[in-house]
Image: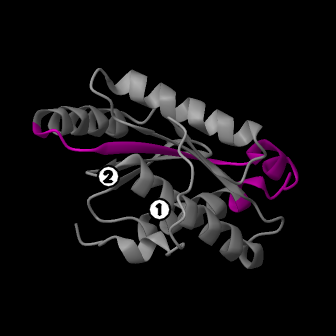
């Protein structure tokens, strides 16, 4: 795991516990990443690099400056959503997932999808507990068909009309 990610997550957990603030952790994973890479046998590296850079830019453009994105493995990204409850984090992640799905069809062949798992900081959490719950939520999203966002604890969509999450949040901090 990315050392900067671990250090920042530990610091944010301490800060949020001290001031009784919300914190959500999202983990994004490219669906069928190995299969995508095997379809690009000889051109594997340029395709992989382009996909990862593009995805990284899309994540960064879609979150606030105060939220922190990290690449934590070859096909996995994490976002630390500071002062963000699980409902708001899910709205942002769903909007981002849909944006990626729509935009990458013209950019990549074959196109790809992402799944995400989200967990919110609980009173007795440490970094490992929070990460494990977000990872389990990601596994749930993949087991339920991929190209979706799952949370632990699971939350359902309320009956409010959908407003693109990017419009709901300030990106300046």
Q: Which residues fall within the magenta stretch?
A: 19-47
On the image, which quarter does residue 167 sit in? Answer: bottom left
**Left or right: where 39 falls relative to 129:** right
Residue 115 is situated, as x and y percent measured from the top left of the image, at: 65, 49
**Left or right: where 52 falls relative to 170:** right
Query: Is residue 47 depicted above or below 83 in this figure?
Result: below
Q: Which colour scheme is used?
A: one colour
Which label number is shown at residue 20?
none
Cα separation between marks 1 and 2 = 10 Å
Residue 82 is situated, as x and y percent measured from the top left of the image, at: 28, 50
Is 99 a magenta residue?
no
Does the CB distance between marks 1 and 2 fall below 8 Å? yes
Residue 19 is situated, as x and y percent measured from the top left of the image, at: 11, 40
Location of the C terminus by quadrant is bottom left
Label 1 sits on residue: 92
Residue 113 is situated, as x and y percent measured from the top left of the image, at: 72, 58
Q: Residue at x 82, y 68 (%)?
A: 109
**Label 1 vs 2, first from the N-terminus:** 2
Is 42 a magenta residue?
yes
Query: Is residue 58 depicted above or below 44 in this figure?
Result: below
- Near mark 2 (Cα within 10 A), the count class, few <14, some 14-19 or many ≥20, is some
Label 2 sits on residue: 84
Q: Residue at x 29, y 20 (%)?
A: 124
- Near mark 1 (Cα within 10 A), the count class, few <14, some 14-19 or many ≥20, is many
Question: Looking at the image, how many numbered discs can be counted on the residues?
Answer: 2
């Amino acid at each position: 795991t990315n050392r900067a990610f671990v250090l920042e997550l530990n610091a944010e957990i301490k800060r949020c516990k001290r001031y009784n603030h919300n914190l959500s952790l999202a983990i994004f994973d490219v669906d069928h990443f190995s299969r995508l890479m095997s379809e690009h046998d000889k051109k594997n590296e340029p395709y992989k690099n382009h996909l990862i850079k593009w995805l990284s830019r899309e994540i960064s453009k879609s979150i606030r400056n105060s939220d922190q994105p990290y690449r934590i493995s070859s096909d996995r990204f994490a976002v630390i959503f500071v002062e963000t409850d699980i409902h708001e984090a899910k709205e942002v992640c769903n909007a981002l997932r849909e944006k990626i799905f729509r935009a990458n069809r013209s950019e990549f062949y074959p196109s790809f999808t992402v799944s995400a798992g989200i967990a919110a900081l609980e009173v007795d959490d440490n970094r490992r507990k929070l990460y494990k719950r977000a990872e389990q939520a990601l596994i749930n999203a993949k087991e339920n068909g991929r190209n979706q966002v799952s949370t632990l604890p699971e939350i359902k969509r309320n009956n409010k009309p959908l407003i693109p999450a990017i419009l709901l949040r300030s990106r300046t901090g």
